[in-house]
Amino acid sequence: MALITYLTTVKFGFGEIAGIEADLAGLGVAKPLIVTDKGIVAAGLVSGIAAHSPLLASAPVFDGTPTNPTEAATRAALAVYRQNGCDGLVAIGGGSPIDLAKAVALLATHDGELASYAAILGGIPRITAAVAPVIAVPTTSGTGSEVGRAALVTLEDGRKLGFISPYLIPKLAICDPELTLGLPAWLTAATGMDAVTHCIETYLSPRENPPAEAIALDGLKRAVGFIERAVKDGSDREARKEMMMAALQGGLTFQKGLGAVHALSHPLGGLKEISLHHGTLNAVLLPAVLRFNEPAAAAKYAAIRAALGLAADADLATWVADLVKRLGMPGSLSQMGLSREVLPAIAEAATKDHSSATNPREAKAADYQAMLEASFG
């Protein structure tokens, strides 16, 4: 049996953010907490969105979201939520504020330590429908977290763990491409390659879900077709719309599971000594993972080539590496400032990551070590 679920509501299109006051009322949220980061506030996006809603204009704002969400930031935001008697959250930004809002929504309604709800620690069945309502407003096009059932949070002990439940899917996603106009080129590229990776990894996942696979392939075509235009011209409305749809589609397929790229990028993103951007990590790691997985998914690789209009004998790994280069992104982990000394620990951590279970080819620590070395440069 294949379990296929699409359990949230998405408002998609230019100008959709204007209806957020009615959206809050529709969910019964009277005292929202805005979760975002300082960059989003500085860009004027929070004030611009709040202008459409008296509730948001007077709402408390937590802008302390770090590049990779942490347990400490979750606790800090939770304190603001409780101090103000909030009954829901509006997450504005990329995947980090959205994931942080999910974690706050969980702890606001569930007792115990955050770690007790982690997927790999048996926490999935402990998460109930009591989770506080979240409205997700993405301002980048990449993570898909606005429709995803997972939140990735780095715990105090350094582990970056996944918290997974259909109850963590935001009750509403407002995907307004207007909010992504003018996004810096580097961030457009990094988040865009995150969407590319999501579509590829979910498509290659061995779980049976043909509708999700069709969505993943369509999302991949959109992302590949428009990412270079979006990077070149931040005001290209068609490119911004198509990239936001590609990111959404990548998120809609998360229920198939991800793979080795994310099994590696999760622990890398949890490193305390260096802050590594998730989408950039995925772009750097994807070629080596594609080379590793091809023997286990030859038919799907052929389908990807056909969908992208590539030659039947094209090497997908090389094609991705060339795309990353054209986008002006780092081509190796060393270029991102990573030290080789951490690779063995990351390889071991990858075997324990929840995404490893849905990689199309079983990967052991030695395999992950080899993929890291190939990506190191």
Image (cartoon, helix red, strand yellow):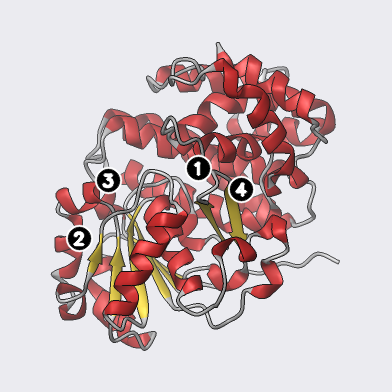
Percent position of residue 164, x then y: 62, 62
Q: Nearer the viewer, residue 29 or 310?
A: 29
Regarding residue 7, the answer to whether it shows in the image is no
Q: Are marks 3 and 2 in contact (CB under 8 Å)?
A: no
Q: CA distance from mark 1 to mark 2?
A: 24 Å
Q: Nearer the viewer, residue 283 or 217?
A: 283
* Viewer-side label of 3, 2: 2
Residue 46, numbered label: 2
Image-quadrant location for residue 252: bottom right
Question: Is 91 above or below relative to 88?
Answer: above
> Please, what secondary structure does the residue beneath circle 2 have?
helix
Q: CA distance from mark 1 to mark 3?
A: 18 Å
Location of mark 3 (residue)? 237
Q: Is residue 291 left or right of residue 248?
A: right
Q: Residue at x 15, y 79 (%)?
A: 54
**Type of amino acid under label 1:** Ala
> Please, what secondary structure does the residue beneath circle 1 have?
helix
Q: Earlier in the sequence, mark 1 or mark 2?
A: 2
Q: Are marks 1 and 4 in contact (CB under 8 Å)?
A: no
Question: Is 148 above or below relative to 315?
Answer: below
**Type of amino acid under label 4:** Ala
Q: CA distance from mark 2 to mark 4?
A: 31 Å
Percent position of residue 324, x then y: 47, 22
Q: Earlier in the sequence, mark 2 or mark 4?
A: 2
Q: Check disc 4: other Cα within 10 Å, few if <14, some if 14-19, many if 20+.
A: many
Q: CA distance from mark 4 to mark 3?
A: 22 Å
